[in-house]
Image (spheres, rainbow, N blue to C red):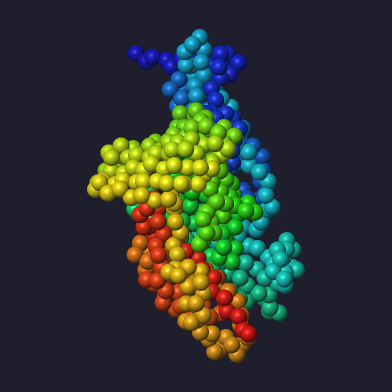
Amino acid sequence: MTIAQNAAFQPFEVDSIAEPRGGMPYLNTFLQTNLRKPVRAAADGISGRVILSAIINPDASVSDITLARSLRPDCDQEAMRVFRLFRAWRPAYKDGKPVRQLVSVPVAFTKNEPFLYVGGVKISHYDEDEKAVTDSSQAQYKQLLPLDSVGMPTGDLVVYKRKPKGWAEAVRLPLQRKKHWKRGPSKQTLFLTGHQDADGQWLGRVYTVDETGTLVEQTDYEEGQRVGSAIQYHANGVVAEKSDELTEGYALSSWYPSGQIQQIWQTGKLKQLERSTPERVLSFWDSTGRQLITEGNGPFLTVKRVESKRDTTQQTDYTEQGQYVGGLREGIWTGRYADDSYGYEERYEKGICQAGKAFSADGDTTRYTEREKQPEFKGGLTGLGEFLSQNLHYPSDAQRARIEGKVFVSFVVCTDGTLCDYEVLKGVAPSVDQEALRVIKKMSGRWKPGYERGKPVRVKYNLPINFMLH
């Protein structure tokens, strides 16, 4: 005998409706943040709404997702994919009991400028000044960028220049896949994939993926420097954090793996060799959807699974708690691993750590006054300037050609003060870039490492080397 499932109620038939934790505005924000318009739809400049119908069950799960109004097949599929990622609902109630309820959710695809996309390749045209033009007959340059259906690069970026007899290849930037200096959450190797210009600078959108090709992060670059937004992803594909660039810092939002909003905050841009500006938290929700911090005020409490400090093959709960006043940390803050393999206690005034102590599984207690400390060249800025003036040599070919400029080099300061993972982010000329790299490598062992809660940590560092003719 088959037992029929209870019929689903309409919203007007219940006492309290089913709704996303945090409210409908946050569901809409989640959908727009996670939505990846199919490249073909973007090429056609498509905009409009897909309307989905679903049932929210008494246990807050979602079932019977159907298409109530179509836009076009590729957009319909993307809307369904993103909606399935959201699993943070509160059920409807009728007569004091949770019940099944039908919901209707619109998923909007915003308008964009259409572009030419042929055979899996995005084709762009530019004039003599390298400004985009829509009339290909007026173009002096043509750029070809192979993209898959969701916009990830699949091949070399090639630029052609118009010649009397047709187009001739001018620049080819191979698709790069480089090992990331950071590790993934489970210590897995990460890779950067995207394009670099002739000076080795990242250009356009760069993706971070793990060994299986799963997307971990995406960031936009211009001349080797981050611009605009950056997005990090949970392992299940949900956006974990999105940061948008402001004039003096970043506006950030984060989500739990369920898709429920977690935190909204702002932070200043980190200035190396200077004490960083404290982050300012505006809102925070716990994992059940309860808002703890409103307009920067309230208690903070979070529990997450982490790798044990005692046994790296085991996971344990990590609990952090404290108080925010005016968006800044205030008073006593604590963090503790459930297996007692790590913990800390800190005292804050207006977001600045005044004193702290951290203990580890071996019983060692470390005391500190700064939660995070940036690496520092021994002798400080003065010592760094003296070292560069004594060791930097202007390449003779660059002098003859009157070449000047700044070379931006990134490297990692290891826990013992040595350097590794060198990379020229923005170059000037081959000989100048190599000289900057040579001098940076000569600095290895002359740095004080960065610290986090009293313990030395690896820190990525960017340093400009200035070449000026007198």
**As rendered, which of 121 and 341 lies closer to the eye?**
341
Figure quadrant of the N terminus: top left
Please state if 135 lies on the left or on the right of 398 as rendered: right
Q: Residue at x 53, y 86 (%)?
A: 395
Q: Does residue 467 sit above or below 90 in this rendering? A: below
> Residue 344 appears at what percent x and percent y?
36, 43
> Residue 335 appears at what percent x and percent y?
38, 40
Q: Is residue 67 visible?
A: no
Q: Residue at x 54, y 70 (%)?
A: 464
**As rendered, which of 148 and 59 lies closer to the eye?**
59
Q: Is residue 161 visible?
A: yes
> Residue 97 appears at what percent x and percent y?
47, 13
**As rendered, which of 349 and 358 lies closer to the eye?**
349
Q: Residue at x 65, y 54 (%)?
A: 247
Please state if 115 lies on the left or on the right of 102 as rendered: right
Figure quadrant of the C terminus: bottom right
> Residue 210 appears at what percent x and percent y?
40, 54
**As rendered, which of 198 and 40 lies closer to the eye?**
198
